[in-house]
Image (spheres, helix red, strand yellow):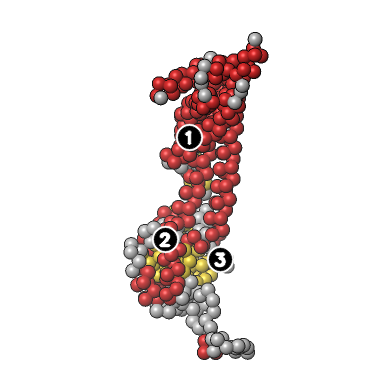
């Protein structure tokens, strides 16, 4: 059996060696298709992975806020839960905002294996300097814990998050806001809230282009925020970071069910972006699959021409006992050989293209950044599998036609 397969493979090799120009063209087509498949998918998947990583790292995986998804049911509705009750004209009691018994919520969040929870208080103030006012959303944090929950430290152009503890009235703002106010590191600016006004010293600046942080956001010490907003011992947000970010939805659902406060996972906060990534992936794989499909046309052409040129040889082989399966094996093997050689050449081309793309620098937000690329073996395997499948189908179509010819008709016509 092995000897027979080797003999049939030898016939396929001789067919390809006698049509070197067409063989080279077909191999080049597959190589170009595989190479550009690797380059395009590396850029697209790499940029997507980098984008998702930023979504995960820039903010806590889960944010528990002092909001609720549905209003608290009225006492009358609870008492007559199964009755036909309609309430109107009642006045809802105004309650102070903030997470009640937040220490229990914080303890439950920290009880999640490997999790780190950071309490914070958010609110709005106005920065004022020389008659110029700027609205600022401040976040009061514990620097030591917050640095373990998000990657704020990596987003700082100048200063350090821990400087909020060492400098009285320290504040960290974005470069855009600092430029609008005309201030820099160490400068003092007046901050006014609904309850009080005080002077703040700039101890850090966020880099430009951080859309997740926002140009109108700032960080202060937690107790400074509580004092400035007139809300001592109150927090309205708990950020939670867990070892496996993709378990965030399950953990958030458990916390929300237990305490009633809204717990948003990073997937929920970024649902619009993630849905766009799915559409983007469909478009990407459609385009690169079309590239590989076009490359398979070269294999189809080579095998079809081989079938047309070897019609008399096919008739002779059939007349001496070769089966339809043997003839299909010969011509499908030709297509697979072309695909395999093209895949290896395409891997080399794709690797070279990725090296070129990886060496490029792009100035973004005042910094030189590289193109994020996905160089995982999975991309090479996908490109090879798709090319081999397309090559096998492209070769099987003419091979199937060749195996069904009537040798008597061919030999009679050749006489």
Label 3: element kind: strand
- In the shown orientation, is residue 22 left or right of residue 171? right
Give the residue at x 60% y 19%.
Answer: 407
Disc 2 residue crowd, few under 14, some 14–19, many 20+, Cα 10 Å: few
- Residue 300 percent coordinates (x, y): 59, 27
- Of the numbered discs 3 and 2, the one sitting upstream in the chain is 3
Q: Can residue 160 be seen in this view?
A: no
Label 1: element kind: helix
Q: Which of 22 and 208 is in front in this view?
A: 22
Give the residue at x 45% y 57%.
Answer: 56
- In the shown orientation, is residue 83 left or right of residue 265? right
Q: In this view, does 133 lie above or below 336?
A: below
Q: How many labels does the image show?
A: 3
Kindly identify which residue carries mark 2: 247
Kindly identify which residue carries mark 1: 384
Disc 3 residue crowd, few under 14, some 14–19, many 20+, Cα 10 Å: some
Q: Is residue 290 above or below residue 229?
A: above
Q: Which of 230 and 335 is in front in this view?
A: 335
Disc 1 residue crowd, few under 14, some 14–19, many 20+, Cα 10 Å: many
Q: Which of 252 and 138 is in front in this view?
A: 252
Q: Quadrant of the C terminus?
A: top right
Q: In which quarter of the image is the N terminus?
A: top left
Cα distance in 3D space between marks 1 and 3: 56 Å
User: Nearer the observer, disc 3 or disc 2?
Assistant: 2
Give the residue at x 54% y 86%.
Answer: 81
Q: Quadrant of residue 404?
A: top right
Kindly identify which residue carries mark 3: 134
Cα distance in 3D space between marks 3 and 2: 38 Å
């Amino acid at each position: 059996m092995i000897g027979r397969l080797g003999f049939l493979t030898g016939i396929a090799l001789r067919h390809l060696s006698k049509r070197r120009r067409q063989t080279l063209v077909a191999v080049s087509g597959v190589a170009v298709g595989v190479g550009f498949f690797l380059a395009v998918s590396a850029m697209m998947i790499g940029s997507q992975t980098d984008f998702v990583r930023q979504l995960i790292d820039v903010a806590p995986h889960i944010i528990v806020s002092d909001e609720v998804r549905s209003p608290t049911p009225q006492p009358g509705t609870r008492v007559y839960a199964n009755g036909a009750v309609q309430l109107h004209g009642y006045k809802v009691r105004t309650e102070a905002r903030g997470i009640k018994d937040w220490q229990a919520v914080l303890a439950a969040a920290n009880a999640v294996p490997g999790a780190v929870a950071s309490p914070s208080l958010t609110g709005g103030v106005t920065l004022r300097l020389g008659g110029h006012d700027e609205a600022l959303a401040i976040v009061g944090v514990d620097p030591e814990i917050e640095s373990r929950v998000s990657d704020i430290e990596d987003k700082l152009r100048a200063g350090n998050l821990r400087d909020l503890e060492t400098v009285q009235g320290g504040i960290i703002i974005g470069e855009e806001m600092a430029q609008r106010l005309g201030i820099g590191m160490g400068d003092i600016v007046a901050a006014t809230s609904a309850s009080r006004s005080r002077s703040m010293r700039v101890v850090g600046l966020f880099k430009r282009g951080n859309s997740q942080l926002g140009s109108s956001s700032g960080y202060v010490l937690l107790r400074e925020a509580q004092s400035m907003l007139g809300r001592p011992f109150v927090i309205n947000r708990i950020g939670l970071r867990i070892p496996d970010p993709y378990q965030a939805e399950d953990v958030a659902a458990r916390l929300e069910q237990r305490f009633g406060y809204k717990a948003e996972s990073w997937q929920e906060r970024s649902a619009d972006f993630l849905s766009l990534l799915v559409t983007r992936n469909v478009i990407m794989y459609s385009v690169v699959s079309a590239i590989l499909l076009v490359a398979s046309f070269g294999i189809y052409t080579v095998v079809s021409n081989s079938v047309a040129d070897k019609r008399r040889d096919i008739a002779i082989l059939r007349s001496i006992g070769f089966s339809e399966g043997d003839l299909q094996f010969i011509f499908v093997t030709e297509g697979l050989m072309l695909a395999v050689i093209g895949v290896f050449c395409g891997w080399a081309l794709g690797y070279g293209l990725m090296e070129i793309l990886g060496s490029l620098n792009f100035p973004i937000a005042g910094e030189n950044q590289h193109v994020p690329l996905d160089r995982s073996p999975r991309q090479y395997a996908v490109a090879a599998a798709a090319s081999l499948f397309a090559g096998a189908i492209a070769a099987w179509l003419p091979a199937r036609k060749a195996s069904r010819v009537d040798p008597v008709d061919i030999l009679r016509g050749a006489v």
